[in-house]
Image: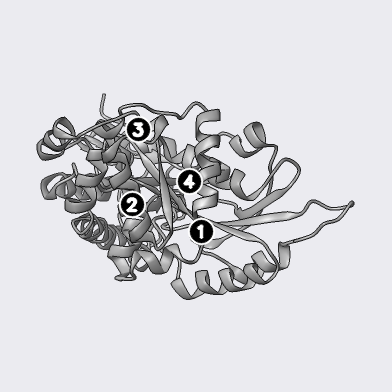
Amino acid sequence: MADLRSDTLTRPTAQMREAMTAAPVGDDVYGEDPTVAELEARVAQLLGHETALFMPTGSMANQVGLRLHAGPGQEIITDHLAHVLRAELGAAAACSGITTRSWVATRGLLEVDTALAMMVPDGGAYQVSTAAVVVENTHNFGGGTVQPLEEMQRLRAATREVGVGVHLDGARLWNAHVATGVPLADYGRCADTVSVCLSKGLGAPVGSVLAADADRIGEARVLRKRLGGGMRQVGILAAAGLHALEHHVERLAQDHARAQATAQHLAQVAPEVVDPQHVQTNILVLDVGAAGWAAGEFIEAAGSEGVLGYPTDARHARFVWHLDVDDAMTDHARAVLGMLLSDPGRSPRP
């Protein structure tokens, strides 16, 4: 079985479990958990920010980050495939009264000129004011797309001039760093607030971190508690994140290589389905509709052959490599997906 539905499926390694068991803990609501404090300081330093706050989930980290920028009746803008729009259940509107607008982005790529043209920094009494732009790096539904650093820097410079903030949804920023060699801090300095996830490719069982300046993180601590995210002896979980940062970042290159090798093979079978040049990290999105498949049926057929994936829409299927997928599983996935693409409409195995 090759379970490629998401890199959230990773399980803690034996060494990570040992680190969790040995972690010194305290009451984090009182700011007294030393392992949490160590994790927060480490992530802040890596991202080039003053301080950080441990969060139970990536969605909470993003939503608290957005609330630091925008209040009720203000807007954030981002691309139409962004996780904060598609996969966080309307939380910005439901929890904070924030409205959103989006532009259509090819593979989730940042389009700076489009974003700048959309912004209304001061809408006055007649228009909604733009409070922040959200950039996702790497881009999940875009297919693991890495945002060019130069474009992120250009956006940051332009938004700063007009008082508009930038939030970086860096759930998979580790993948962008490993794929490009760009220091994490260079990406981090392109935004006022940055969220990163520990429970995807890095293999921690839970947890994200929000980084920003001290004033914002002080406010974020209040917002986290208000949303039910105040945690107690959570150093047990923070220890998993620390272990992941020490041992699981550079190995992400293996996930990237396996996804790329699969893309190259499938491009030989059905070149209309995938362009290997667009597979930059650990996420492979196939346009199975171009090969005559409905995405749901393709995923069902692949699952019956022991390869699990996720339909992102009616014609696209996503497969994500991670810590628990090895070369043998990759070989199996490559064979099954190639077989199905060469035989559109094949019925799932009973």
The quadrant of the rendering that contains the C terminus is: top left
> Is the residue marked by circle 3 packed among few (<14), some (14-19), or many (20+) residues within 10 Å?
some
Q: Residue 82 carries which label?
A: none
Q: Residue 41 carries which label?
A: 2
Instruction: Please provide percent x and percent y for residue 123.
Output: 82, 57
Q: Mark 3 points at which residue?
A: 300
| Residue 108, disc | 1
In this picture, is 304 found above or below 5?
A: above
- Discs 2, 4 touching: Cβ within 8 Å: no
Judging by the rendered image, the residue that carries numbered circle 4 is 315
Element under disc 4: loop
Counting from the top left corner in percent of width and height, residue 150 is at 48, 76
Which of the 4 quarters of the picture holds residue 7? top left
How far, Cα to Cα, is label 1 from label 3? 26 Å
Q: Residue at x 39, y 56 (%)?
A: 144
Tell me which label, 1 or 3, sits earlier in the chain.
Answer: 1
The way the protein has been coloured in the rendering is one colour
- Give the structural element (helix, strand or loop) at label 2: helix
